[in-house]
Amino acid sequence: MTRYVIGRLGGVVVILLAVCLFTYLIFFKLSPDPAVMICGKTCTPDRIDSIRDVLGLNQPLLTQFWEFLRGIVAGRDYGTVHCSAPCLGYSFQTNESVWNMLTTRLPVSITVAVGAAVLWLLAGVAGGLISAIKQGTWWDRSAMALALTGVSVPNYVLALVLQYVLVVKLQVLPFPAAPAFADNPVLWFESYLMPWTVLAVGYACLYARLTRANVIDTLAENFLRTARAKGLSRPLILRRHALRPALTPITTIFGMDFAGLLGGALITETVFGLNGIGKLAADSIAKNDQPVIMAVTLLAAFFVVVGNVVVDLVYTALDPRVRVTSS
Amino acid sequence: MTDELFVVEDLTVTLPTSRGPVDVVKDVSFTVGRDDTLGIVGESGSGKSMTALAVLGLLPPGARTSGSVRLDGRELLGQSEGELRSVRGNAISMVFQDPLSSLNPYYTVGLQIEEGYRAHRGGSKRAARQVAIEAMERVRIPDAARRVDDYPHQFSGGQRQRIMIAMALCCSPSLLIADEPTTALDVTVQAQILELLAELQTQTGTGLIFITHDLAVISSIARRVLVMCAGDPVEYGTAEQVFSDPRHEYTRTLLDAVPRIDDEVML
């Protein structure tokens, strides 16, 4: 088992290096000259040269990439400025340390992702479960029709409608201001309620349909017939014999969805003006702020790749058939 | 003549289909005594398994039944779910065809034996675990005390079926219904399972209903035989009668379908 984990972590490093290289090539080599961008309107050829020198843009591509990697691990110097590890460079727009930008915005994205995940898991799994048990009834039909509608409504439409109804018309919620939890827990909760809901709706609908399908499949399994033939009570059969096989595959999908969200909920954060990773990504792309784009991409890749490994490990713990062969 | 433990009279099972209700079992009657074995034979879809499922109220939703099913004089047909639950796995147990899919892959075999025992007898987890180990020893799973914590996929096909039998017998049922218990197994394992069933039956005096499409198996294990065809009971009598002097055309066809070693073979 330990060997398996070490092997998987080694794989993570390789994938992240590959992502690094591709992102580096795409954003630094295929987009406009960073030196010209930084230089701005009052630019002279001399100034461009000195910027190129400071950023190391005159060096061969591989050396530049190596410097970038080394910066992440050991820090690096830009002329007289020292950027301590982990160094992801400085924003072309604000000269702010990219690492600092990430670390200040990450908590917002994590809050958004965790809150939404709790909502969609509760609503989606419970809804799907009830639908499966009441298969074919009006409850099932209306819940599934609702779920189909929910999956089809784009995030930004839902976000704008909710804002208009709840904030502007009914004034039951404040416009999201996202204060720190410790400062004002009530306002904090009220601010995040809409982003959580908007983000959760689509996933909840998807999970409801998935859960329903999985539970119905499991209920038709032979071991469910065995459980009934043993004289077990219906709640025990459902809880023990139907739920675990039905929900185990959902953990895989959940892990991937959640990891994806940690890298930033671009639309939701932008619509609600939350300063998370998603909004940072949107802003940096709009302004062609390459070091930030690079960092945001790497962060998202990091979460997805690590999330993948975590999902596999959790699955190994949940499904004994996988457990025994892998150890 | 053995006394009658289990009596089925005029059992009819009707299933809803897209083309209206269909009688999949029609007026089936038979009896099983203590320490007695009834074989139910027929080809696929002849209603053998439906008969067995109907007895325990395990039919698919929408199925209707009529007639009478009595265990020790107690009517089972039309009983409430709660009543039936107290019978299932307790007074009447069942062993199914495919042991791998009939065991839940997520739980140890120990837990799956224990839960049935505890549902009917209660008691502590520890006591139930001891029952599970003893049940596994009874069906001759080697090293049962250790293997009780293994998962179904860690056993061979024959062992899995032994575990199903251990599970079925842990509450000492008075009737065991084995629905094609050897069909998914290879021939040598098949013989071992049949031997085991016969041995356990002698020890416990359990009545046995053995459902199969395999006439060779039936002739070696059953005292009485019921032949079914398309839901109809076409022949019912002692094994000797049915095999040596089949009255019904369908039984003769079934018997003729058995390959014999002295048959002429076209090459």
Image (tube, rainbow, N blue to C red):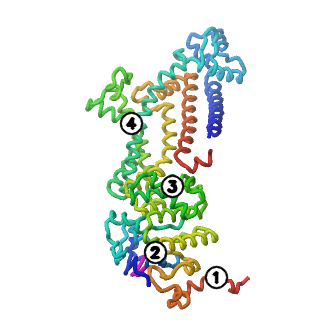
Q: Residue furthest left?
A: A170
Q: Which quadrant of the structure image shows residue A24? A: top right
Residue B57's disc number: none
Amino acid type, callout 2: Gly
Residues beneath discs 2 and 4 located on the same chain: no
Badge 4 crowding class, 10 Å Cα cut-off, few under 14, some 14 to 19, many 20 or more, is many
The mark lying in front, picked from 2 and 1, is 2
Write the residue at 67% across / 16% down. Answer: A56
Question: Chain for mark 1?
Answer: B
| Residue B207, numbered label | 2
Compared across the picture, whether B154 is left or right of A200 comes to right
B15 vs B250, nearest the viewer:
B250
Residue at the location (35% across, 20% down)? A183
Q: Which residue is mark 3?
A: B110
Q: Is residue B197 magenta?
A: no
Q: Are marks 2 and 1 in contact (CB under 8 Å)?
A: no
Q: Quadrant of the C terminus of chain A?
A: top right
- The quarter of the image holding the N terminus of chain A is top right
Q: Earlier in the sequence, mark 3 or mark 1?
A: 3
Callout 1: SS: loop
Q: CA distance from mark 3 to mark 1?
A: 41 Å
